[in-house]
Amino acid sequence: MNGNRHGDTHGDGQAPGGEPWEELVGAALLGTERRRGSGTTGSPRALLDAAAVVAVRRRAGLRPAEAGPRPEPAAPDPRPAPPDAARRRLAQLLAGRTGGGGGRRGSAPDLTELLPQWLAAAVRHGYRAPAAQVPALLDAAKARTDLRPQALALAGARGRWLARLNPEWRFALRSGAGGGELPAPDDPAGVARLWQEGLFAERVALLGAVRAHEAAAAPLLLATTWSTERAEDRLMFLDSLRSGLSEADEPFLEQALGDRSRNVRATAAELLSALVGSALAGRMAQRALACVGPQGVVPPVACDAGMLRDGVVERPPAGRGERAWWLGQLVEAAPLSCWRERFAGLDPAGILALPVAEGWAEELHAAWCRAAVRQRDPLWSKALLGSASAPPAAGPATASLAERAKLLETLPEEERAGWVAEFVRAHGLSEAFQLLGVSVVPWAAELGDAVVDALDSARLAGSYPWSFSGVMGLAERCLDPAAADRLESLLSVALAAESAGAAGADANAPGGSAAAEVTPGAEAYWAEAFQRLVSTLRLRAAMLAELAELAELAEPAPARAA
């Protein structure tokens, strides 16, 4: 640009003729019809033209500024970088490229779904992110919130350092102590200072660190400012006590039952009811036992002040009766251990098998389901789930798969996998997605075999693989990579069936009278789906082996025999 262009833009940001930038912004915000005096003649197009001219002139008129101070270098990160092969793999995953070098798009692994597994495995091995890949890692975490915890753990101090320099990555600062390090949990002065002066996100991170270090110290810290906190902040802080919940939290939670916020009171009551030895749990047990027994069910006739203080919500949702609503809340909050004595020593399965008159069985069993989930009681959960091979509606628990998934989470890993495997063998994959989602990864061999068998059965039945797209996606992420060998044999069968089907179609084409035994085209799609599964499992195995390389080298060599 010509040097005299600088004279076209005044120091106050005005264009020739005295048209200031602020006037144009005001016209854009208020509307050109209301700001005709801005020189835009009421035309939106004229406003945009004027803004374009002023923007160019403002930029052309900028003078170089003095260089600011150089930022301090990032704090050192003592963790090792991943092995070279793992670093190359991370670059590939961040770029979203496939490793197949061509081929049909539908048979290539979905690298975006493998990135979370790479990050989690790298964190487990104690690596830091390679310095050159931290910006790409932060970009990925900005776009996908599910990646943030692991990505920020890998990025470490360098990631926080970069986030202070780029507003696009400011989320990384909100995830910790404002981009700096939290004070040590056993540093009372540092903890008190940040708790009093820090931003909300910093205080949440600090409370979590204190809770992890010494669970009983968290409610003591909360108590120092509890009365001055906003209701929404009190609720968030209280919710953080779910982790490490113990009897030591009871005095603070009992006090929170008198909070002025209904949501805070309800959360405090829920947490107290999870403490089966708490005073609130005892009060709820008395109320529930007065309503339910061998003689039948008699729901409460009113919601008194004591029930309200203990977290019972008075007004039911639309379509629910008041008394049934109150009964469910009482049973849900009562310790499950109180029912054995009430029903003459019967175990959970025996209690659930008892007939319940007057149509209260569904309400009662649903409340016991919620209690089993809240109290993490595997015996009651197993009894409520019943046999996985039975029709869901025939079990003692709710037929809702979402509720059954919650019950499954309370079971030991092996029992959980066995129950889901039995469900898949009995009912197929159509309703198994939510249940598979709570199974431990990688899936146990029994569960993996059941899923592969069900996929092959669906192929033989002539279904299309996209009918099970959710399960296929889970299988790619959750199957043990060792299942690739068996899937490869199924792939060969599918390819052979596809070829035979194509040959049969060619042979029958002139007459057009013979019908194919399988759905036309289905075998080709199954071959593609199995190919994608095999490729993904092989890639996962390679990925995990690459990350384990340094750990294996660091292990001491076995002693030689004398």
Image (cartoon, rainbow, N blue to C red):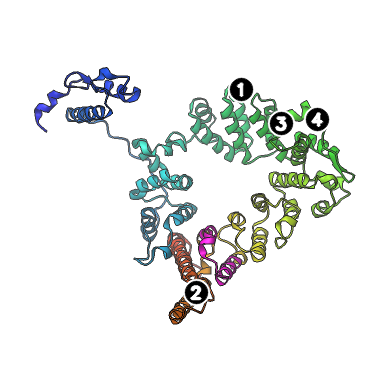
Give coordinates of residue 226: x percent, y percent.
60, 25
Mark positioned earlier in the residue sequence (1 or 4): 1
Instruction: Give the residue type that dot 1 points to.
Output: Ser
Q: Secondary structure at mark 2?
A: helix
The quarter holding residue 279 reads top right
Q: Nearer the viewer, mark 1 or mark 3?
A: 3
Q: Is residue 27 left or right of residue 548?
A: left
Give the labeled residue for mark 1.
227
Cα–Cα span, label 4 and label 3: 11 Å
Mark positioned earlier in the residue sequence (4 or 2): 4
Cα–Cα span, label 1 and label 4: 32 Å
Q: Secondary structure at mark 4?
A: loop
| Front-most of residues 258 and 330 | 330
**Residue pictured at 65% horizontal, 66% vertical:** 425
Residue 472 in the magenta stretch? The answer is yes
Q: Is residue 110 left or right of residue 228?
A: left
Give coordinates of residue 241: x percent, y percent.
62, 37
The image shows residue 230, relative to residue 239, as above or below, that is: above
Cα–Cα span, label 4 and label 2: 64 Å
Range of magenta residues: 448-475
Cα–Cα span, label 1 and label 3: 28 Å
